[in-house]
Image (tube, rainbow, N blue to C red):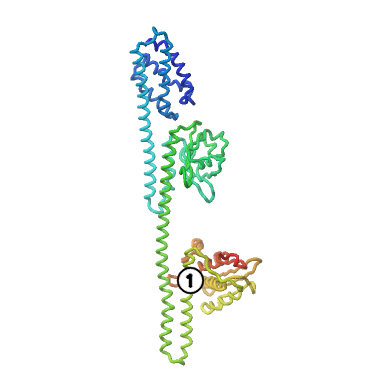
Amino acid sequence: MNFMQHHRDEILVEWATEARSAASARGLTDAELKNVMPLVLAALTGGAEWNGLKRPIESHVADRIRRGFEIGEIVEEFAILERCVADSVRRSPADLRPTEEELARLFVTLQSIMVQTTDVFQEHMRLDEQREKRYLRQLRTLADTALRAPSGAHDGLEARLHEAMEIVREAMGADAAALLLYEPESRKLVTRAVAGDVEAGLQEFADSVDLDSFTGQVAAHAQATELSDVVTTELKVSDALRFSGIHSLLGVRLPRQHRFLGIMYIGMREARPFTNRETRRLEALGEGLTLHLDNAKLHAELREHLSELEAERALRERFVAVLAHDLRGPLATAKMSTCLLDELDDGAEQRPALIRSIDQNLDLIDKMIHDLLDVSRMRAGQRLPLRIDWCDLRTLADEVVGDLRAVHGERFEIEGDPEVRGLWSRDELKRALWNLAENGAKYGAPDSPVTIRLERRRREAVVAVRNLGPAIRPQDREHIFDLFARTRAAPPIGASWGLGLASVRACVEAHGGTVSVDSGADETTFTMILPLDARPHQP
């Protein structure tokens, strides 16, 4: 077409001027702006085959999509060209204008190009959506595999977060991807997984949620946060990240609303803005990962709850077995004593001994019931109730040693201050002392001394019970004050409830004090530290 041949350069200049002021041209160089238009004008002129435009149009649309252009912005470039051609025709003398038939063919060609552009865009979007779905499906498969792993296995979701970040990095075409999870105790974001070139530099790095940091900005906003250049930004970023070679960052909050779990971000070595499509895809991947993290957390909590129920069941069975054994003994003894007592004459010499036996066994049963009530309180997380009054630890220690000598012999010694008075619960402290001293006699070396040392300080009293013998294993010391805890050296079930040291801790804590154990190669010492006045520590 002669008209287009004569006016092609003029139309291209006019088009470039108008297109450069349009929103779609922002951020494009002159070459990038004009990349396909000379070919389109050549086709309109008849200097290029129509079929030859298909591949350049596809390349043009793909380039615009990568830069975040929407379909309206891409089509607008051709609409501007159509207006420029029409304006050029109007300005030309009538005898130099194309015929109506030529104009119709010209504009039909431009309309065909716009339709083709729209078709290419929609096909690209369809493939892009399929790609996104594919990576979301990979995340779901990874999470499902992790959740099906046996309890205690090392391939749970927490252990496979690195694989999840590899999926995210590949889906985004990024050079790096990182996941940071929030730890409420430290108020820090801790890097849990990194994929890509900067993995070694970022692993195990913790960052803050302060608003003057990049991570804090991501955490504070529901919308994605973009950083164009890590090196020059005034926001706080880690040195590991700043000098990693990564320049542009795009981060999303997990989840975008509600309870904060952490953040995920990708990094590019190229310093460039991110497109709307990249932002939307990262947000979609973040939503998918959040769902899987929530499911993994619920799954872990369920497993933990099931383990607690199993432990509770085993504990209950053990408790019932011990209870049945220990209660049956004193009950049977008391019953037998009452039968013998019934058969004796009034003046029989055995009568006082049998009455004492019945009384002792009833006292033992009463102590067991008292322990049962304490177990119920301790299991419920409650403090033991105390009846506080003035009492002397030395007097309590003398009474305890007198009782235990009748059972274990002359093994018990008391040393330290002759009087240690304070406002405490006499009954509970006596029971705690009795448990510690009997524990020393049971588990210490046979016939070795058990020493109770008393010390009064300015604001507290210290009671130390020491026995000689093998050390308590570190793994046993860790739980030795727990309910029903028993060391490997403990007697078999039936000989002890496993409540003694737990009740000692409950007693000491109810007084506002502390209890600890120190066990070396040849001796073990349990130490109670009590405030001289327990009243301020009561509920």
Is residue 102 shown left or right of residue 294? left
- Depicted 429 relative to depicted 285: above or below: below
Asked if residue 130 is positioned above or below residue 454 in the image, the reply reads above
Residue 145 relative to residue 364: left or right: left
37 and 232: which one is in front? 37
In this rendering, would 111 be left or right of 432?
left
Label 1 SS: helix
> What residue lies at 45% left-to-right and 92% top-to-bottom?
346
The mark tally for this picture is 1
Residue 489 in view of the camera? no
**Which residue is tagged 1?**
371
Left or right of 330 in this view: 471: right
Label 1 sits on what residue type?
A: Asp
- Residue furthest out toward the top: 95
Label 1 neighbourhood size at 10 Å, few (<14), some (14-19), many (20+)? Answer: some
In the picture, which quadrant includes the C terminus?
A: bottom right
Whole-percent x, y for residue 185 in the image: 53, 51
- The quarter holding residue 433 reads bottom right
Q: Name the spot of residue 347 as percent of width and height, x first.
A: 46, 92
Q: Quadrant of the N terminus?
A: top left
Horizontal and vertical percent for residue 287?
42, 42
Farthest-out residue, right: 458
The answer to whether any part of residue 340 appears in the image is yes
Q: Position of residue 5 (x, y in %)?
A: 40, 11
